Amino acid sequence: MSEKSKSKPPSQEFVDAVTIDQSIAADCELCGRTCFEDSEMAGDWEPGELEQYRLGVKQRPDKFVAVPLVRVGKIAGKQVITTCPCNGLRSYEDFIWSHRHIIAKYLQSKTERIAQAAYDDEAEAEFVMDNVSREDANIKFSKCQGGCGGYFYTDSMDDRMFCPRCAEAIPPPEPEPEPSHWDDSDNLPF
């Protein structure tokens, strides 16, 4: 990070874009400092906590810094205090701004591809739904003759028009044996 970037604060637009939360005290992972709001009215301080931070400023000004408002965000996987005097966000903003044409082209291209994929998925889903609707129109239902009285998909019923449950509970009758083709005249003693 250049010294020029460190001395110049990030723009308010960039700070607002990166900020996601607010706190009374938090660590800036860009500079390693703990930023805190130096006011008894800032929030719910634990007894002696604010005094410890104030003492930290006197003993280790490179590690503790009082700021009017502790605004917290994330960039490049790091927690940042967007109001930290280190101005560490400026180098990210400068990078993005100096590469804005590449970034804009990338975002446009990626957005178009995602939108096209979503459109294709939607068209495919509509096609599937239309086919399912057509298939549903061809499905026939019949009343079970096995005693339950329910209506079932006709193709799932047996030849007696019993639903699977009734067919299992009431097995088909055993077929009668075929009559024999012999009579007493065939049983001659000679």
Image: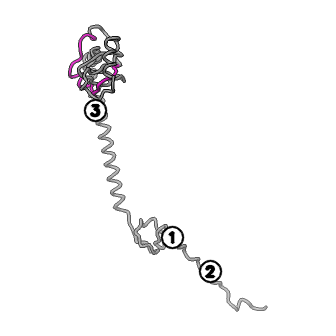
Q: Which residues are magenta?
A: 5-28
Instruction: Tell me which residue sits at (31%, 34%) in the image.
Output: 114
Separation of residues labelled 2 and 3 (CA atoms): 74 Å
Between disc 1 and disc 2, the foreground one is 1
- Magenta stretch: includes residue 150: no
> Which of the numbered marks, if any, corresponds to residue 91?
none
Q: In this rendering, would 163 be left or right of 65?
A: right
The residue indicated by pointer 2 is: 177
Separation of residues labelled 1 and 2 (CA atoms): 22 Å
Q: Residue furthest front?
A: 47
Residue 144, can we see it?
Answer: yes
Q: Nearer the viewer, residue 87 or 155?
A: 87
The residue indicated by pointer 3 is: 112
| Residue 88 found in image quarter | top left
| Residue 155 found in image quarter | bottom left
Q: Relative to residue 176, is residue 99 depicted above or below?
A: above
